[in-house]
Image (cartoon, grey):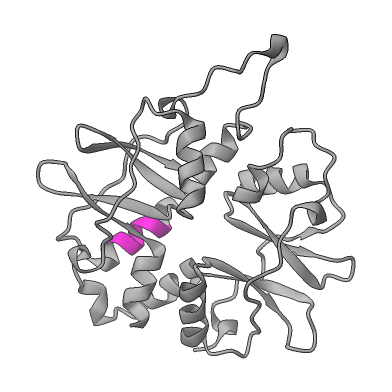
Amino acid sequence: MRVQDLIDKKYPFIYEDEQATKARAVLRERDLRTLPVTDENKHVVGVITRNDMLTITSSISPIRVKGIMSAPRLIVTPDMDAHLTVRKMLRLDEWFVPVVRSSQDKTYAGMLGLENFITVYIAKEASRLATPLSKIMSTELFVCSVDDEVDNVWRTMQEKSLSGCPVVTKGRPVGMLTQTNLLESSMVFPTFEAKKGRFKAPSKISSIMKTPVISLKPTNTIKEAAQLMLKRSIGRMPIVDNKGKLVGIVDREDIVRALVR
C-alpha cells in the first residue's frame, strides 16, 4: 500500500501571505488539527496548527501566516510505502503530514492523516482489530477538574505536548478538553491584563469542555474504538471500568501503533 492510496486530495491549504485569522477560521470551521501552508506557486513551505493559533493575542491580529507557521517535520510523496510512512509519523508524533507531487516537485498534492490509514485498515477486517483496548490504552493520565483554571491546564498541556485531556469528577470522566475547545472558545492565552490594571477573571474548564463524554471499556475492541473515532470525528476517548471510573485513554496514535506493529 502506498501513500497515494490514502491521501486526502481535497484537504485545504492556505497561502503564507494570507492573514493568520483566516487560518484560525479554517481550522475552526473544518475542525482541523493542522493546515498546510504554501507559497504563491503552491509549493509547501510550512504548516500551521491549532496550538499556533492559540498564541495569537487578538482575533483581529494583522499577523500573516508565515509569521507563525513552522517547518513541516515530515513531507511525503505519493509513491512512498504507507506503512513505513505511518511509522515515521508515529515516531515524530505527527497526526497529519503534507504530501507533495514528488521529491523534486514540492507542489502541494494533499494531506495524509492517521485517520486515512485507520479508515483503510478497518475495511480489511484485520484480526488485530479484535484486540481489547486494555492491551493498548495509556494508563499514565493527565486529567483536570471542572473547577481548574483554563490557563493553567492549557500550559500543562503544552508542556506535556497534549492536545486533549479528560475532565474528571470523583474519578469519573464528565467531559473532555481539547485544543479544538480552546480554539472555539476564542480565548487568548495566557490571560492578559484588562483595563484599570486588573487581570481578567480566569475562566474555568467547565465553561468550555465538551460534553457528554464518549467512553468505552477495556473489553471493547480496537475496531469499536476506531469506528467511533471516525464516526464522531474525535481523536481520543476515555476508557472506564464497570463503575464508570477512568482507567485509561486511547487515541488515534495508540490504534495506529497497534495496527502497524
Main SS, magenta region, reads helix
Say which quarter of the image contains residue 223.
bottom left
Residue 213: where, in percent of width, then height? 32, 40
Asked whether residue 122 is in view, the answer is no
Q: Above or below — where is 107 with respect to 70? A: below
Q: Is residue 109 left or right of residue 183?
A: right
Q: Above or below — where is 183 with respect to 10? A: above
Asked whether residue 163 is in view, the answer is yes
Residue 254: where, in percent of width, then height? 35, 67
Task: Write the residue at 60% across / 18% down.
Answer: 200
Task: Write the residue at 37% across / 81% down.
Answer: 260
Task: Write the residue at 51% across / 49% down.
Answer: 158
Q: Is residue 196 left or right of residue 169?
A: right
For the residue pair 1 and 261, the one nearer the viewer reads as: 261
For the residue pair 166 and 55, the one nearer the viewer reads as: 55
Residue stretch rendered in magenta on the structure: 225-230
For the residue pair 159 and 154, the one nearer the viewer reads as: 159
